[in-house]
Image (cartoon, rainbow, N blue to C red):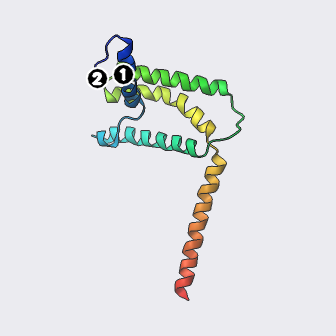
Amino acid sequence: MKKLEPTFSSFIINTPQALSLSTIRPYPSDVKHILSLAAAAETDLLLFLFFLFLLWKKRNGSHSLTFIYFCLFLGFSILITIGYAVNNLGAIVRYRSIVLPLLLVPVFCGIDWQKVASVLFNNIKNKNNVAENGNLASEN
């Protein structure tokens, strides 16, 4: 970690590192034992949910924007504070677990689950049809 000085410019310079440390670490290359593997898998699952959120976002939801903004701003302010103050990866994962529900609520509220299900089931249905047609073609 870069050394954090008590100046405004040091906080600005160290913000990307603090966000990276508290949001997307541990990387798969950081895995040393089973618990760090679980933390890395959790991070990958959260990134996958965020990717789903970006792909299939609800256009008009009946959710409270005030509550979602509250969750996002409080969650990210705590994550930045954790990234600035803590340099132990195990402690970061432990402290981050308190903030994750605040960040998961807006993601879950924003995903259009009906679109995800239709794409998933259509893909499964098409794969079954291809397999059935392939078997029929090879029998003839």
Q: Residue at x 42, y 31 (%)?
A: 23
Q: Is residue 5 above or below residue 87?
A: above
Left/right of residue 50 with respect to residue 81 in the rendered view: right
Crowd class of label 2 (few under 14; some 14 to 19; many from 20; radius 10 Å): few
Q: Is residue 95 above or below residue 57?
A: above
Secondary-structure class at tag 2: loop
Secondary-structure class at tag 1: helix
Q: Say which amino acid is labelled 1.
A: Ile
Per the model, the C-alpha gap separating discs 2 and 1 is 9 Å
* Contact flag, marks 2 and 1 (Cβ < 8 Å): yes
Quarter of the image with the N terminus is: top left
Residue that lies at the very extreme toward the bottom in this rendered image: 140
Q: Residue at x 58, y 61 (%)?
A: 123
Chain-order first, disc 2 or disc 1: 2
Choose top left, top right, bottom left or bottom right for residue 70: top right
Choose top left, top right, bottom left or bottom right for residue 139: bottom right
Quarter of the image with the C terminus is: bottom right
Residue that lies at the very extreme toward the top in this rendered image: 6
- Measuring from the top left, give residue 90's x and y in whole percent: 33, 29
Q: Which residue is mark 2?
A: 2
Q: Say which amino acid is labelled 2.
A: Lys
- Measuring from the top left, give residue 121's x and y in whole percent: 61, 59
Q: Which mark is residue 75?
A: none
Q: Which residue is mark 1?
A: 13
- Measuring from the top left, give residue 136's x and y in whole percent: 57, 82
